[in-house]
Image (spheres, grey):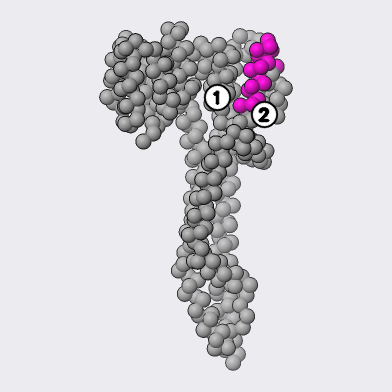
Amino acid sequence: MSVSPKEKIFFAEHLSLMIKGGIPISEALETLKNGAESKELKKALDDILKRVLEGERLEKSFARHPRIFDKFFRSVIRVGESSGTLEENLRYLSLQIRKDYELKGKIMGALLYPFLVIALAVVIILGVTFFVIPKIVPLFQALQQMGVAGELPFATKFLIFLSSFLKKFWYVIIGGFFILIFIFKILQRIKFIRFYFDNIKLSLPIIGQISKNINLARFSQSLYTLLKSGMPILEALETCRSILPNEIYKRNLIDVIAGVERGEKISSSLKKIPKNFPPIFAEMILVGEKTGSLEDSLFYLSRFYEREVDTSLKNISSIIGPILLIFIGVFIILIALSTIIPIYEFIGEIRVR
């Protein structure tokens, strides 16, 4: 059982409140361990508590459990320990995890309606294949044997063929579907292949823009959190690079980091990548650098691109849903016509005779 984002948010928020209230870290960890819901988190906190009592730094203890506490989480904790701002950093951390969780929730919510419509279409297809067509086919065959029926329409022939094919090879289709998903997941783990997948994703008409906005929102929100926690700019950029979901943006940040190391401003490096970092994004960063309010600029950008993602997802959901419903309606009409028309034709021939 994995540790949910909600539980991580709860952990970071309550550890921050306990430290603020003057409770020793060991006692706070003990309390949170006893209140942990997942066995994995409870086990990890038990190990962390033992190591902290032995004198090990908190960040180092967290680093022994990378599946639960990622690089971003550990980096914020380390800076907080070093600067004496652990309480504030934990609060920033909980806000960051919450933002990521809400963004994923919005994406899943937008995909839910199209998924339900597609699932309905699959159920209709299976129902027709296994229950409707098998009862109609013998009727057509009997009428043809009696010499009453003529040639079946192409749509009816195709429907019968599809039904027969699905009944014979349904296990091959289902197995092939899961094999394709498995192969795709394996390929996604290979870095250079994931790079091409992500590049294709960014090139798609609507999905590409949404993907760009997601990465821009994630980058600006993460960099804001890290700088707010007191992390040096180069280390913050490197940490952001490690958590961005898209390989293209990760490579872009390598160039940005190299530029900052040469003494360039972040905005100057971003302006060299207008395809993935829009001019307005770089300009807002420049304003923050000039006025000494980079964190405020990043906060504004994160909220702006989160709203853009939210609006785009709502628009997609409102457009795709009706299109899929129309598709299902047309499919049902074709099925009806493919079965009813031949029957009427046969009845007509019988009356003529």
Q: Which residues are magenta?
A: 250-268
Residue 310 marker: none
**SS under mark 2:** loop
- Mark 1 crowdedness (10 Å alpha carbons): few <14, some 14-19, many ≥20: some
Q: Quadrant of the C terminus?
A: bottom right
Q: Residue at x 49, y 34 (%)?
A: 104
Q: Which residue is mark 1?
A: 242
Extreme-bottom residue of the structure: 353
Q: Which residue is mark 2?
A: 276
Query: Mark 2 or mark 1: which comes first in sequence?
Result: 1
Q: Would you say the magenta stretch is mainly helix, strand or loop?
A: helix
- Distance in Å between CA atoms under marks 2 and 1: 17 Å
Q: Residue at x 37, y 25 (%)?
A: 10
- At label 2, the amino acid type is Asn
- At label 1, the amino acid type is Ser
Q: Which x, y percent locates residue 299? A: 55, 20
Left or right position of 352 against 61: right
Give the quarter of the image for residue 131: bottom left
Q: Which x, y percent locates residue 85? A: 43, 9
